[in-house]
């Protein structure tokens, strides 16, 4: 006998804090009962009650090929037969590292890990070890995992030191973290003018996916690169979400087209490179990466790093998305979705703006695209929450929070996009 989503959620809350193993899944931001997913295939999810949804979360980004892609499934099955984990090197992890390096010019070596949080935390430690400095800069609204030093918010005034946004994070841990406003050139210039020679790294999501979808402007990124170079500060691109998702070479390849010679010093990857398995990576120049143990003094290790089943999944995924025309087709499908959603809103007289790159998109109930976290907070959250539930009722599975980007996969058909736009037109009038 099938259980209902409500029954499963009640059961989960008895044994799991909040009933979920990652907070946003609890639907606290939008209200209501989370859907417990039973299976997925292609562009679709089915919940415990048997209802089908067109999926625009895609496991929060990894499922760029859709769920259950035959080539990926075959690779995982073959790898699982050979062994789940060895705790020793394998050829496949070398192949995956080579595949990442082949597509990202600024990366000469990578270290594989098991999660985006682990990769971001390790890149931060490496930057401090490479520079001998302790201060770091991050931007309000950018999320780099739940490492203590990065769970901070800005205080009052310009470029104040961070204060913990989570209980259990001591003030001393984040006292060296500076939090600035995204896309604010004046702020970064002021901070570098007064503290530039003390800053180990600047970590940034080039397209922020945790305040929905907000991209760093080209002038902002150009100036950030100039200041980091001038002061010997490492520029760290967090491409956990954007890497191999917005373009084959990640977001950094898009900035390189607009800023001559542009590249970050360190890059953090996840999601797509694991194809849905727990896998992430960080990488950079050979000189910086050689500071990692066992070659150098910066320690980092992990029992499941380079897991043979996860690397099989990731490698098969990267091989598929490297096929000619893949990203052109994916970007066209994503653009059709965003254009359709904005047109439907315009017809309904509802202020809605959207943006997209590759297979990643976002939209806001606002008159103009936000450029920073403060502007995102000013968008119509109540309308989003009503819209989310109206879409869910119509079989469209969007992120259950205003602050999360969405994802389109190669499995989404033109008919799926049309059905989504039609559902949106109905939802906006509901």
Image (tube, helix red, strand yellow):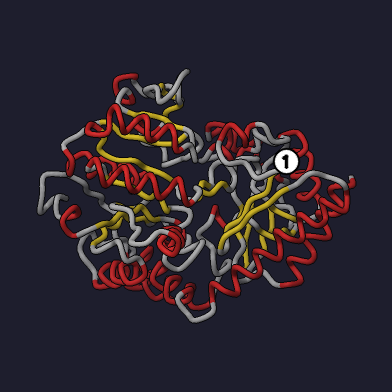
**Residue that lies at the very extreme toward the bottom in this rendered image:** 324
Residue at 37% in and 62% down: 260
**Which is nearer the eye, 363 or 424?**
363
Residue at 71% in and 40% down: 6
Residue 263: image quadrant is: bottom left
**Which is nearer the eye, 351 or 306?**
351
**Which is nearer the eye, 190 or 384?**
190
Residue at 57% in and 66% down: 67
Residue 345 falls left or right of residue 81: right
Q: In this view, does 154 lie above or below 301?
A: above
On the image, the x and y values in percent for residue 53 come to 72, 58
Q: Is residue 61 above or below residue 205?
A: below
Q: In which quarter of the image is the C terminus?
A: top right
Residue 304 falls left or right of residue 244: left
Q: Is residue 327 above or below residue 255?
A: below
On the image, the x and y values in percent for residue 23 come to 55, 37
Residue 191 falls left or right of residue 366: left
Q: How many labels does the image show?
A: 1
* Label 1 Cα neighbours within 10 Å, binned few <14 / some 14-19 / many ≥20: some
On the image, the x and y values in percent for residue 166 come to 44, 25
Residue 232: image quadrant is: top left
On the image, the x and y values in percent for residue 51 come to 75, 57
**Which is nearer the eye, 399 or 182?**
182
Secondary structure of the residue carrying tag 1 is loop
Pointer 1 residue: 366
């Amino acid at each position: 006998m099938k259980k209902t989503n409500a029954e499963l959620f009640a059961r989960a809350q008895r044994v799991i804090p909040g009933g979920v193993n990652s907070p946003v899944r609890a639907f606290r931001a939008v209200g209501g009962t989370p859907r417990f997913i039973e299976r997925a295939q292609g562009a679709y999810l089915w919940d415990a009650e048997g209802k089908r949804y067109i999926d625009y979360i895609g496991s929060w980004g990894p499922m760029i090929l859709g769920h259950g892609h035959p080539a990926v499934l075959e690779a995982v099955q073959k790898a699982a037969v050979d062994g789940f984990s060895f705790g020793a090197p394998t050829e496949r992890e070398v192949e995956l590292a080579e595949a990442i390096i082949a597509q990202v010019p600024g990366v000469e070596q990578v270290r594989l890990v098991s999660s985006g949080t682990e990769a971001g935390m390790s890149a931060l430690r490496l930057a401090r070890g490479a520079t001998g400095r302790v201060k770091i800069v991050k931007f309000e609204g950018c999320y780099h995992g739940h490492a203590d030093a990065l769970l901070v918010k800005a205080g009052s005034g310009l470029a104040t030191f961070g204060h913990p946004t989570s209980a259990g994070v001591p003030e001393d841990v984040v006292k060296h973290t500076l939090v600035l406003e995204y896309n604010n050139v004046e702020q970064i210039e002021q901070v570098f003018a007064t503290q530039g020679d003390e800053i180990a790294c600047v970590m940034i999501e080039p397209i922020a996916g945790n305040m929905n979808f907000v991209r760093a402007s080209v002038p902002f990124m150009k100036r950030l690169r100039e200041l980091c170079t001038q002061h010997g500060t490492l520029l760290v691109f967090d491409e956990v979400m954007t890497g191999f998702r917005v373009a084959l070479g990640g977001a950094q390849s898009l900035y390189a087209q607009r800023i001559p010679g542009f590249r970050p010093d360190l890059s953090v990857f996840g999601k797509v490179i694991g194809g849905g398995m727990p896998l992430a990576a960080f990488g950079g120049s050979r000189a910086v990466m050689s500071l990692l143990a066992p070659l150098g003094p910066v320690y980092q290790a992990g029992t499941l790093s380079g897991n043979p089943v996860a690397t099989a999944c990731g490698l098969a995924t990267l091989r598929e998305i490297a096929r000619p025309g893949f990203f052109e087709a994916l970007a066209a499908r994503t653009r059709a979705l965003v254009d359709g959603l904005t047109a439907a809103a315009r017809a309904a007289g509802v202020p809605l703006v959207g943006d997209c790159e590759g297979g990643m998109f976002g939209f806001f109930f606002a008159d103009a695209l936000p450029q920073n976290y403060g502007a995102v907070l000013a968008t119509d959250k109540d309308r989003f929450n009503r819209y989310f539930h109206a879409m869910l009722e119509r079989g469209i599975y969007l992120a259950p929070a205003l602050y999360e980007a969405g994802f389109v996969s190669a499995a989404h058909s033109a008919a799926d996009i049309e059905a989504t736009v039609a559902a949106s037109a109905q939802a906006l009038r509901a």
